Image (spheres, rainbow, N blue to C red):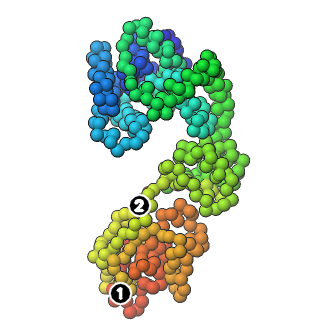
């Protein structure tokens, strides 16, 4: 076992004796096996354990087992305890636990200069992940399974099956902890582990070997595909601080690579098909749990979803500034010396009715543009100025007596402009964040 373990590490260049290793350690069979393989191979490592307090005495027993084992072999041990009250408002417990676990690992890595973080994922975990990816819809990446290493995160047991792990532990008379929650079918991974995969093994006793062959056959295909995908990203994807733009002028390339790219932003394969069908329909919007995608002329635009409040901010006559949803600074002066711009709006204070209101624009909003007699739809102004769909969603209006007096950062209303008769000027300045 140790020879196979060391060969896997060497062949895949996972880590070396010079590395400062941190082992994510649950106390279950997988992590106990990795603990002893590292120890018997004379690697220097420390242990990190999270007590989630989800199984009462059983969780406490796991933490005690971890500490005792580390004490027995003089291994440095870090334990983080999450109080039971933390879980009262959590719906996706497994996702939250994973976030806690990896945040803890990263904190330790930074504080103690660990060079690699090790987890005990094995071949069975890999098969479970691939099948789960297939079930929910995946691209090529999901078929390749768990990576052996990703940045500083390493999985050195992916060469071995769970049954072999238990054989190794039993042959050495090593103890481990059993997690009773692994038997609960309310968790998706458990359903695949305890129900679906046993059926596949019954159908084909060599199912694990068949999956190994699949991964071997996919590896060279994936290498060619991802070389082309990287070229696509370099030539057709443009990213800045606020948005990602994808050139939509080559639909053949998009058909090959769009899902591979946008799945990382929470979009699924069905949405990708709809996006490809509507590339010529400027204005179409698609939402994931975290991002919004717009079809806007020759581009697909992706922005991080922000909560756009429909509430109105009230601005009193004595207010000096507001900070959210945008930073505005207010001042009054008797003189008429001013330097107006898109960022600075100066108005005849006598024409204002306080409190003013600040809100996001809505379809149907109108303004009387400076120098014009009639009203104009703000939506038409945005079209004339070729404002992108993502920027439209962020647009704010300042209102007096429910009439739009300023499209913030863009256009002032003629109704509040400075006149020769103006006695007092009210200035509103937009403070843009420095990039």
Q: Position of residue 6 (x, y in %)?
A: 49, 14
Q: Give the residue drawn at x 64%, y 62%.
A: 282
Q: Quadrant of residue 347?
A: bottom left
Residue 393, given in percent of the width and then of the height, sits at 51, 63
Q: Is residue 35 left or right of residue 240?
A: left
Q: Does the image show residue 246? A: yes
Q: Nearer the viewer, mark 1 or mark 2?
A: 1
Vertical comparison of 151 with 285: above or below: above
Mark 1 or 2, nearer chain start: 1
Residue 152, how many percent across, how many down? Answer: 45, 30
Q: What's the residue at 56%, 72% (across, down)?
A: 379
Name the quadrant of the C terminus: bottom left
Answer with left or right where residue 298 lies relative to residue 111.
Answer: right
Label 1, on which residue? Answer: 350
- Circle 2 is placed at which residue position? 433
Frontmost residue, 405 versus 13: 405
Q: Is residue 168 above or below residue 115?
A: above
Q: Residue furthest right?
A: 252
Q: Residue at x 42, y 16 (%)?
A: 33
Asked if residue 77 can be seen in this view, the reply is no
Q: Residue at x 31, y 75 (%)?
A: 316
Label 2 SS? loop
The numbered dot on residue 79 is none
Q: Nearer the viewer, residue 156 or 365?
A: 365
User: Callout 1: helix, strand or loop?
Assistant: helix
Vertical order, 10 against 192 (above or below): above
Could you tell me residue 248's position as x and y percent? 66, 54
């Amino acid at each position: 076992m140790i020879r196979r373990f060391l060969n896997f590490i060497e062949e895949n260049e996972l880590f070396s004796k010079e590395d400062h290793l941190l082992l994510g350690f649950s106390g279950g069979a997988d992590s106990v096996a990795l603990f002893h393989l590292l120890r018997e191979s004379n690697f220097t490592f420390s242990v990190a354990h999270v007590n989630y307090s989800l199984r009462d005495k059983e969780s406490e027993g796991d933490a005690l087992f971890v500490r005792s084992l580390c004490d027995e072999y003089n291994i440095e041990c870090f334990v983080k305890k999450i109080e039971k009250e933390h879980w009262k408002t959590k719906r996706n417990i497994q996702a939250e636990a994973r976030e806690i676990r990896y945040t803890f690992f990263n904190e330790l890595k930074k504080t103690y200069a660990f060079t690699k973080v090790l987890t005990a994922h094995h071949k069975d975990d890999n098969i479970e992940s691939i099948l789960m990816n297939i079930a929910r819809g995946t691209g090529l990446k999901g078929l390749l399974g768990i990576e052996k290493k990703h940045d500083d995160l390493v999985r050195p047991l992916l060469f071995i099956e769970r049954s072999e792990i238990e054989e190794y532990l039993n042959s050495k008379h090593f103890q481990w902890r059993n997690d009773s929650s692994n038997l609960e079918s309310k968790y998706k991974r458990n359903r695949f582990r305890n129900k679906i995969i046993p059926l596949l093994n019954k159908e084909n006793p060599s199912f694990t070997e068949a999956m190994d062959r699949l991964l071997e056959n996919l590896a060279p295909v994936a290498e060619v595909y991802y070389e082309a995908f990287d070229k696509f990203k370099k030539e057709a994807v443009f990213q800045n601080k606020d948005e990602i733009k994808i050139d939509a002028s080559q639909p053949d390339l998009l058909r090959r690579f769009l899902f591979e790219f946008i799945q990382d932003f929470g979009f699924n394969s069905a949405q990708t098909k709809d996006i490809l069908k509507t590339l010529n329909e400027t204005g179409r919007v698609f939402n994931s749990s975290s991002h919004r995608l717009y079809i806007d002329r020759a581009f697909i635009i992706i922005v991080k979803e922000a909560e756009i409040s429909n509430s109105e901010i009230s601005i009193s006559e004595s207010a000096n500034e507001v900070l959210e949803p945008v930073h505005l600074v207010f001042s009054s002066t008797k003189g008429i010396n001013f330097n107006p711009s898109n960022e600075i709006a100066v108005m005849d204070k006598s024409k204002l009715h306080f409190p003013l209101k600040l809100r996001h624009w809505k379809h149907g909003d109108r303004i009387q543009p400076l120098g014009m007699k009639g009203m104009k739809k703000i939506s038409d102004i945005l079209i004339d100025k070729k404002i992108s769909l993502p920027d439209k969603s962020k647009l704010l209006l300042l209102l007096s007596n429910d009439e739009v007096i300023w499209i913030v950062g863009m256009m002032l209303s003629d109704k509040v402009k400075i006149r020769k008769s103006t006695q007092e000027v009210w200035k509103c300045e937009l403070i843009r964040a420095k990039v």
